[in-house]
Amino acid sequence: MREVVVEADGGSRGNPGPAGYGAVVLDPATGETLAEAAEYIGVATNNVAEYKGLVAGLKAARELFPDATVHVRMDSKLVVEQMSGRWKIKHPDMKPLAAEAGRVFPAGRVRYEWIPRERNKHADRLANEAMDAGKRGRQWEPSASTAGLDASAARNAAAPAPSGPPGDATAGAARARAALAGSSGGGGTATGAATGPTAGTRAGAPAGSATGPGAWPGAVSRPATPDAADDGLFAAEEAVTASVASGDFEAEAGALAPVGHAARAHAPATDGPAARAAAPGVGADAAEGAPPAPGGAVAPPPAAGRATAPAARPEAPAAPRQGWAGPDMGAPATFVLLRHGETALTPEKRFSGSGGSDPELSAAGLRQAEAVAEALAARGTIQEIVSSPLTRCRQTAGAVAARLGLDVRIEQGLRETDFGAWEGLTFGEVRARHPEDLDAWLASPKAAPTGGGESFATVARRVAATRDRLTAAYAGRTVLLVTHVTPIKTLVRLALGAPPESLFRMELSAASISAVAYYADGNASVRLLNDTSHLRG
């Protein structure tokens, strides 16, 4: 029985907006183009265009070889996972298109594979030709297409790609992990581009693909060459890292020094609250970049990992294994950490935690939520969405969920710190009203805000317990956690084994993306911090 390869892609310039698709049928042995199809489909979403592209490619293959088996390759994670039966199809616009695709060939004769956008350039060019034709008020014409030639020229001109983002010092470690696992690649997720249905066919130039070693978090293997649009998100950083800390500040930092005025007078200025407050991100949802506070504070000693926890804590587990001696080789649970969009309190740098007014997203915050939703849909990596229960996070998560066709699970452990009587106040207002409480809070993670709020130590224990539940529930999957400043900084701090004062030394912007991968052997890898590139379009 003959086998053919179908590659499809598509897009929407606006999502929804003017949309088109491209599909190509290839000989798997020679890479020869057997047929091409493309069409401008009017106003549609990326996902609709993706599914219509799949249908077009399958129908073109059936016209050539009705009895063939088909290997479908797409850079849409959504379509590949749904058509493979691993993800549910919930969006009403997707269900009839998926059903139509399933009727073209018997299910047992079609298999699906995700490929990165870099390997799907032929179909991508066809889709763009279709959209360009639609912009001129016309339909795509096979005789005018140069997609096959362009794709071939691009492959021939391509230089060897790096196996990680610029400056990736762990790319070699990624390959070593893969070699230890007995494979040349790693688990991976995908970038989601759009694809769509049929318009014409013609013979064309050969098409092929370039592959390479590397790893990408998730369940689908990919080559090491990330598309430029991926920005290194969830990149091939597979190095074994230091222990995942317990979340207990005493176990990590030891006993804190006294916080009296005499002790603060001897503290180095770089470790005092002035330095901490001057660094963007004081841990409050909207108190980042607050003005420096007068005086100094004793910084805790350097944090210790689990392996060096005090002997008085026999229950502390041993540190995860490090180096190359038997690390966990399975796909990690990858948490993509999304801070919610702006509220009215954010630009005013007011404390906004879980004990305040629970503000909604502002107009700017809603725009940020849509921008991050578009960026995550383009990458196509997210498999699950979990959100803080607070309104600003649920709204941000809802924008992403609507774009990806996923449900949102609410997790109480992802809520922001309760800032007690400081809720709604600026840093300066807290300094004026509660100076001693503020000094204590800046000096010790065990100190709570005025009026019965949560200490950072309490929040760290809550976040660490939530992390452990979610990593167990989502092993090997890529999960979007929509949450707040303190939980995100805490997850990053614990993954790095950094001391508590590091919370005051991280920048975390509204609607920013960070990422941490967690392996079954207890190791963690911080992949990204405070990416806001999607907000600069």
Image (tube, grey):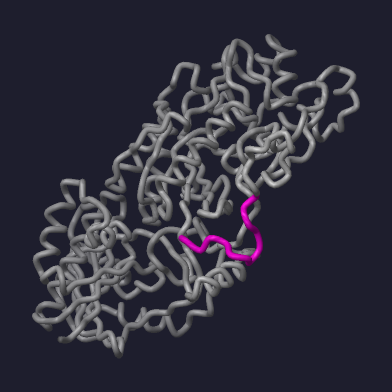
Question: Which region shows up in magenta?
Answer: 319-330
Q: Which residue is depicted at the point 39% across and 55% down? A: 381
Placement of 296 over or under 240, stated as above or below: above
Placement of 120 over or under 513, stated as above or below: below
- Which secondary structure type mostly characterizes the magenta part of the structure? loop
Q: Position of residue 258 (x, y in %)?
A: 82, 22
Left or right of 420: which side holds 474?
Answer: left
Q: Which residue is depicted at the point 21% across and 52% down? A: 44
Pick the residue in front: 519 or 260.
519
Pick the residue in front: 307 or 518.
307
Q: Is residue 395 visible?
A: yes
Pick the residue in front: 6 or 465.
465
Placement of 354 over or under 80, stated as above or below: above
Q: Which residue is depicted at the point 53% across and 46% down? A: 514
| Quadrant occupied by the N terminus | bottom left
Q: Is residue 138 visible?
A: no
Q: Position of residue 400 (x, y in %)?
A: 35, 43
Furthest-front residue in view?
Answer: 314
| Quarter location, residue 96 | bottom left
Left or right of 283: which side holds 154?
Answer: left
| Quarter location, residue 131 | bottom left
| Quarter location, residue 113 | bottom left
Q: Position of residue 434 (x, y in %)?
A: 69, 11
Left or right of 113: which side holds 442?
Answer: right
Total labels drawn: 0
